[in-house]
């Protein structure tokens, strides 16, 4: 199962005892993705596009808890889950829709339904179950809601802001996608929706990912420093050999001659180690200064 599927599986198992929160969650599912379908005899079923039948089962459970249906049947095929209605339930569902839908737009949830913070949590949970998805955090951080229009997207963005979660919106074909790419904000949303197990799994993956990145950075930095040191030492030895062959150590000042001889004797030694071998001992900056003087001298000899 995908990580997104694991999150949804956890969400559908949550207990939601408050009636107003049940209504808010059901409202998000019905308004954002559920559709009442009609045939010659009128409205007969509610279709819920979903990547898991568990979402439709959650919808059915909410209907039953709210005592809105007397007799229903559930089926799923080709990513379309259907709740078949009894004739006696049709008028009830119509009344429910009148309550949960915003009069300003049929694709929006009535703001009164999600007025309290707990109902906003339930609303975000229902919206994620119906139109949300999340990428595998091992590959990257991305959570999104695929909305049918900009009004839906704006309602989601506004609700997320109550929890200081700053989502962005992008057009994708005929849809408006509300998305998060910051791992901290995705973690916060999982917490808001009540997906605490998924939150901990994500945090564990994030810690491992950060540790791997830190180790890789350290290894790369150390490798770069080693390469830089080796290249510098190689150039120093080439310059000193050139001075020895074309100028002679006898013509060097004592401190430079001693430095040149030590570098040839200990080609792999660090600047600190070379300084320890000198008499008297010299620090890294002093060793570096002498080697730079030798390189400058070698350059002058080559150009003369």
Image (spheres, grey):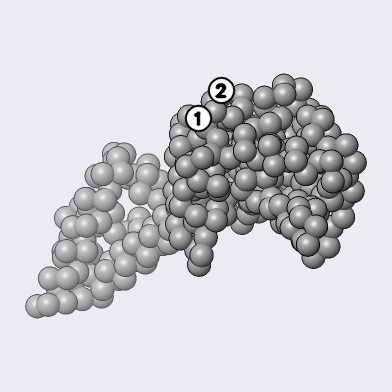
Crowd tier of the residue under label 2, counting other residues whose Cα lies within 10 Å: few below 14, some 14–19, many 20 or above: few
User: In the picture shown, does residue 43 fall above or below 114?
Assistant: below
Q: Quadrant of the N terminus?
A: bottom right
Q: Quadrant of the C terminus?
A: bottom left
- Per the model, the C-alpha gap separating discs 1 and 2 is 12 Å
> Is residue 125 visible to us here?
no
Residue at (87, 55) in percent of width and height: 75
Q: Secondary structure at mark 2?
A: loop
Residue at (68, 31) in percent of width and height: 23
Residue at (50, 46) in percent of width and height: 105
Label 1 or label 2, whichever comes before in sequence order: 2
Q: Secondary structure at mark 1?
A: loop
Identify residue for label 1: 163
Residue 139 percent location from the top left of the image: 61, 56
Q: Which mark is residue 116?
A: 2
Please tell me which residue lies in front, 113 or 71: 71
In the image, is 238 to the left or to the right of 188?
left
């Amino acid at each position: 199962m995908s990580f997104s599927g694991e999150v949804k599986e956890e969400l559908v198992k949550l207990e939601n005892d408050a009636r107003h929160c049940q209504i808010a969650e059901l409202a998000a599912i019905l308004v954002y993705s559920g559709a009442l379908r009609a045939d010659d005899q009128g409205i007969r079923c509610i279709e819920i596009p979903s990547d898991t039948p568990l979402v439709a089962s959650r919808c059915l459970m909410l209907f039953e808890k709210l005592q809105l249906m007397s007799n229903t049947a559930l089926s799923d095929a080709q990513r379309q889950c259907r709740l078949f209605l009894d004739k006696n339930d049709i008028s009830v569902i119509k009344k429910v829709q009148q309550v949960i839908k915003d009069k300003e737009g049929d694709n929006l949830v009535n703001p009164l339904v999600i007025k309290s913070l707990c109902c906003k949590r339930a609303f975000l949970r229902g919206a994620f179950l119906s139109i949300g998805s999340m990428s595998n955090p091992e590959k990257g951080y991305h959570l999104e809601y695929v909305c049918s229009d900009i009004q839906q997207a704006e309602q989601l963005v506004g609700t997320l802001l109550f929890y200081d979660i700053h989502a962005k919106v992008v057009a994708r074909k005929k849809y408006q996608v509300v998305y998060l790419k910051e791992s901290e904000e995705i973690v916060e949303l999982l917490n808001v929706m009540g997906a605490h197990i998924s939150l901990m799994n994500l945090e564990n993956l994030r810690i491992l990912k950060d540790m791997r990145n830190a180790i890789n950075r350290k290894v790369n930095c150390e490798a770069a420093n080693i390469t830089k040191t080796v290249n510098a030492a190689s150039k120093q030895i080439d310059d000193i050999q050139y001075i020895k062959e074309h100028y002679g150590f006898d013509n060097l000042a004592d401190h430079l001659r001693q430095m040149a001889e030590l570098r040839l004797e200990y080609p792999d030694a660090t600047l600190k180690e070379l300084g320890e071998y000198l008499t008297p001992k010299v620090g890294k900056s002093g060793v570096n200064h002498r080697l730079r003087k030798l390189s400058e001298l070698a350059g002058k000899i080559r150009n003369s």
